[in-house]
Image (cartoon, coloured by chain):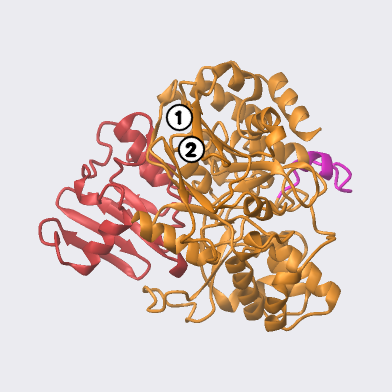
Amino acid sequence: MGVKIDGLKCTACMACELACGYHRDDAFALLSSCIMPYRGRKKKDYFGILLKEEESLVVTRPEGVEIMRIGMVEEGDQENEKAKADSSAKPMLLREPCDLCSDVEDGPFCIRFCPFEAISIE
Amino acid sequence: MEYLSSDKIAIIDLASSEITEEELDEDLVKERIGGAGITTTLYERFKDEDPIVLGSGLLTGTLVPASALGIMTAKSPLTGKVCHAPLTLYAGMELKYSGFDYIVFKGASEKPVYLWIHDGIADINDADEVWGKDVWESTDYMREVIGDNMIQVLTIGKAGESGSDIAQVCINYWASGDRWGFGNLLGQKKLKLIAIRGMGLLEIADPEGFVNTCRELLSEVKAGSFAGKKGIAEIPVAMGEEDIKDWIAPLIHRHSSCFNTPFAANTFVYLDEDPALLKEPDIEEPGFLLTDIYGLLGFKKLGSSASDSCRILRDCAKYGIDAVAVAELSQKSGRTDPEEIKKSFPGLKGPLMSSGKGVFSPCTPPKPIFTDFSLPSDGSGDAQWWERRQAVAYIFGIDPLFALMSPELSEEKLLELSNIGTELNLTSEILDSVIGEITK
């Protein structure tokens, strides 16, 4: 079971990122979220979602989903370098992985707070 | 101020580059709530030094739907009134998390400077390297210098540097709701840009209660009258400009939202690339993000093609000039050729019919969108309703466009959330008083 993201429904509003940050910190903050829109390439309107899982970095782009095994993509990989740059304040690989908000009954906060229903469980 | 706040105000003397910091007094929040309520108070306090005040709403940057708004308050060089411009996209949110609730710029610098705020630190820096660059170059420059491509940049272009009446403060690469000539004001103060990064943390008085209420509110909001709609063209359609949808459709790439806003009001058009392209384009600048409803309508009414209109809008944003004013002045002078319009930027001057008459930016339609808010059908209540609705949005930090399409974001609900989030006893009487003060 894991979080599934529809990259074409996403509007990069960041609600998922803030909701995840709330789950981690019991306050509003963004640096500990394991899900975040990458929004650094605005001149190209190229955005999607990064998700840190236990063993993978899931990159959901408009053209599809790519799953990169953590440990296999650490250095030198062009896409990984881009992914790191897109979360430059605190690289995704340094963050806690998604735990599906297992300590709450209603399921992951990111799903509950996505206004566009771009996130689901599969 | 303990909750939903960084508890800090920066006061920046541009003449000396001296920065002082103050705590955000809880009593001030109890009296003026936040957003435009407090930016107005700070403006009055420093009014002898022609201040520009930036701030965020009490609920900005939270899980409250559409809590995207930051506010810029100053005396408009165009109208002579103290006015408020909306800071949307991610700018309001980043400001909220920057470590400062409010920032006051007073006086004027003798040489070009910029402000860099992050992690509760505010630095005034020499802007010689960036002065003279256009809006896009300025944003690129700051992101490269600081090494973070998510920095939000409020910047002027050549229009602001050269004292144009209709210069605009742009947000990153795009047009903003500054219809007050605030770009001219920044230029006069030699303040080239404000770079913002928010990495702070906001405590909540009752976290679970606040988040549960936000979740219930989001469910109600999502079922609202805008459900199933997206993109900037939906707004003019709702105002009776129905043919705009087919006109712009061939250029549309994707739609995006301002921070945590359930309606995707911004539309990216590809002008030099196939709009249907899903992968990352090879070219660096394939198009433009449409954020300005009336700028788009202005050039459409001038008879320009959608492609030409969007290219002129891009030129306006790069130059840092209010596209609505450019469209109006082009129409008056009979200019329709895009190249001629671009060449005319340096000499454009008012008077303008499109300037706002009140204190809130006229960048949003003057009536409800997609729904009627139970107002009289003859439109007789629209003007008064619009002003109050914008005041509420600018106080709490709600996207002012979304506020016009979501009755679910009621004054009562926003007060309730404010009280759960802060443990302050804010009342409708206090809200009435703040609205009265900022709209008088």
Is B84 colored magenta in this rendering? Answer: no
Q: Badge 1 local density, few (<14 within 10 Å), some, or many (20+)? A: many
Determine whether the residue tagged by mark 2 lies in a helix, strand or loop.
helix
Going by the picture, which residue comes out furthest to the left?
Answer: A71
Looking at the rendered structure, the secondary structure element under dot 1 is loop
**Chain letter of the residue carrying label 2:** B
* Left or right position of B378 against B178: right
* Residue occupied by mark 1: B6
Nearest to N terminus: mark 1 or mark 2: 1
- Chain A color in figure: red
Q: Main secondary structure of the magenta part?
A: loop
* Location of residue B119 (image quadrant): top left
Q: Is residue B256 left or right of residue B367?
A: left
Do tag 1 and tag 2 residues touch (Cβ < 8 Å)?
yes
Chain ID for orange = B
Other-residue count near label 2 (Cα within 10 Å), few / some / many at <14 / 14–19 / ≥20: many
Residue, disc 2: B96
Same chain shared by disc 1 and disc 2: yes
The stretch in magenta equals B371-386
- What's under tag 2, amino acid-wise? Lys
Residue A43, horizontal then vertical, whole percent: 46, 67
- Identified at 52% across, 51% down, the residue is B113
The label number, if any, that marks residue B419 in the structure image: none
Q: Is residue A11 above or below residue B83?
A: below
Confirm whether residue B258 shows in the render. Answer: no
Q: CA distance from mark 1 to mark 2?
A: 8 Å
- The answer for which chain carries disc 1 is B
